[in-house]
Image (cartoon, rainbow, N blue to C red):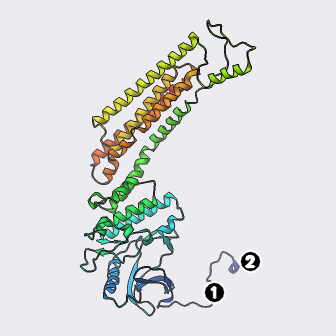
């Protein structure tokens, strides 16, 4: 048995030949910087820092000295996990008069997007960025130069760090308030040299949101970048609420939408129709040409192929004529069903019954279910060989019904979003939620009915 002092589980100090921690900045290494400032990574107390000072050609200019001092005064009052931390301002033999900031091991948001991160990661970045903006705005600080290159994302945990407050401003400063921006992310009021507020940063955020989610949150991004700042969101918190509301609304409607998709698939499968035997029962029909047992093989195959496609062979008989009449009646009835459902829905729209987007969407789903049920019922009245032809009409009308009201979604406000913006009372919000549950129960009932009709 090994001696206990040699147990491999025993922790111990690793021997090192030297250990020295300096109180001065050492191991300076320059970092890229396109502005009037110089950046350097340096070591002190065994920890990395970033030093920010003026480049030599700007060091003696009082204006740039004031900008550096202003940046320090603004940033030193901020203490947020998603804003780069400033520890102080001091003289360094290498950098001169410099701001001392935390070192962030990460890459810019632009570089991260080139890595094609998951949507979950991007949602986390979006939330953290809005938290940081809301915090800065609560301290009356406007960044004025928000862009992907000024947003660092840590490699460990994908945490946001907003950096470079060199062009920032605050109500407390009466100097150095000249227009400053990066043109491609500047708001219209910045370009015009007008007075700015937090909505300037929110404009830039909208542009960034579009880059992060090209095919999502389009309405929210569009509101962020409205030319008139009065039409934008009033705060980062309202944007965060709108994003959360959209995700929450999707979860609320998810099960209903799943049922709707299943119904659409079911209706689509009906196009295939139930298989029927390709067997021709010979009958002696006056005026008809029977298919004799010794008839030409090509003629028999042509007859069967034509029948399998759901069309009639070029013969005339009372039986086939009766089948055609049944098909025509079923098609006329289905058109009448479609007109009845859409007319009722259009009337409700014209009467202003749909105040909120959620109510409109639920009722549209109910209308689609109603039409799907009627399609199944009418299909049962059609002789089996002709159901393919009938189903072409059913699918055409279904597609028309499913698509013609899409444009209405944007016409109605979302009550979930209004509630998140504190523009809807809790009582009204609770009432509307109860109503959506009622609609959900109706959709569930219609789903069961559609399955029963299809099974008949």
Residue 254's disc number: none
Q: Nearer the viewer, residue 28 or 159?
A: 28
Q: Residue at x 44, y 47 (%)?
A: 251
| Image quarter of the C terminus | top right
SS at circle 1: loop
Comes first in the chain, label 1 or label 2: 2
Vertical side of 273 occupied by 149: above or below: below
- Across and down, in percent, residue 381 comes to 51, 19
- Mark 1 packing: few (<14 Cα in 10 Å), some, or many (20+)? few
Q: Which residue is mark 2?
A: 2
Q: Nearer the viewer, residue 445 or 113?
A: 113
Q: Pointers 1 and 2 in contact (CB under 8 A)?
A: no
Q: Residue at x 50, y 31 (%)?
A: 395
| Image quarter of the N terminus | bottom right
Q: Which residue is mark 1?
A: 15
**207 to the left or right of 299:** left
Q: Residue at x 30, y 59 (%)?
A: 232
Q: Residue at x 31, y 65 (%)?
A: 188
**153 to the left or right of 317:** left
- Across and down, in percent, residue 342 comes to 37, 31
- Across and down, in percent, residue 267 comes to 52, 32
SS at circle 2: loop
Q: CA distance from mark 1 to mark 2?
A: 23 Å
């Amino acid at each position: 048995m090994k001696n206990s002092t040699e147990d491999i589980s025993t922790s111990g100090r690793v021997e090192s030949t030297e250990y020295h921690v300096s109180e001065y900045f050492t191991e300076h290494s320059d970092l890229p910087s396109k502005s009037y400032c110089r950046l350097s990574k340096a070591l002190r107390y065994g920890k990395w820092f970033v030093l920010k000072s003026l480049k030599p050609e700007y060091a003696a200019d009082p204006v740039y000295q004031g900008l550096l001092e202003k940046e320090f005064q603004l940033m030193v009052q901020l203490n947020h996990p998603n804003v780069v931390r400033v520890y102080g301002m001091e003289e360094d033999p290498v950098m001169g008069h410099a701001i001392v900031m935390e070192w962030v091991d990460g890459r810019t948001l632009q570089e991260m997007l080139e890595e094609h991160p998951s949507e979950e990661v991007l949602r986390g970045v979006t939330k953290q960025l809005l938290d940081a903006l809301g915090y800065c705005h609560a301290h009356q600080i406007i960044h004025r130069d928000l862009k992907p290159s000024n947003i660092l994302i840590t490699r460990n945990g994908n945490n946001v760090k907003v950096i470079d407050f060199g062009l920032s401003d605050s109500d407390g400063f009466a100097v150095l308030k000249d227009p400053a921006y990066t043109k491609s992310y500047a708001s219209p009021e910045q370009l015009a040299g007008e007075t700015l507020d937090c909505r300037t940063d929110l404009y830039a955020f909208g542009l960034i949101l579009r880059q992060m989610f090209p095919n999502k949150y389009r309405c929210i991004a569009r509101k962020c970048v409205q030319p008139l700042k009065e039409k934008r969101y009033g705060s980062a918190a309202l944007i965060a609420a709108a994003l959360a509301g959209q995700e929450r609304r999707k979860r609320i409607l998810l099960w209903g939408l799943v049922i709707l998709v299943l119904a659409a698939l079911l209706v689509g499968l009906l196009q295939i129709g139930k298989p029927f035997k390709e067997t021709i029962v010979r009958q002696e029909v006056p005026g008809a040409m029977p298919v004799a047992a010794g008839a030409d093989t090509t003629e028999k195959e042509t007859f069967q192929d034509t029948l399998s496609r759901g069309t009639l062979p070029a013969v005339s008989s009372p039986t086939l004529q009766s089948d055609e009449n049944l098909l025509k009646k079923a098609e006329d009835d289905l058109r009448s069903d479609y007109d009845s459902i859409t007319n009722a829905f259009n009337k409700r729209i014209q009467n202003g019954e749909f105040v909120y987007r959620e109510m409109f969407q639920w009722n549209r789903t109910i209308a689609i279910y109603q039409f799907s049920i009627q399609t199944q019922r009418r299909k049962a009245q059609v002789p089996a060989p002709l159901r393919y032809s009938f189903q072409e009409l059913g699918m055409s009308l279904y597609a028309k019904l499913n698509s013609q009201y899409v444009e209405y979604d944007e016409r109605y406000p979302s009550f979930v979003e209004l509630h998140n913006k504190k523009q809807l009372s809790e009582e009204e919000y609770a009432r509307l939620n109860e109503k959506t549950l009622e609609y959900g129960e109706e959709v569930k009932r219609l789903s069961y009915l559609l399955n029963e009709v299809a099974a008949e």
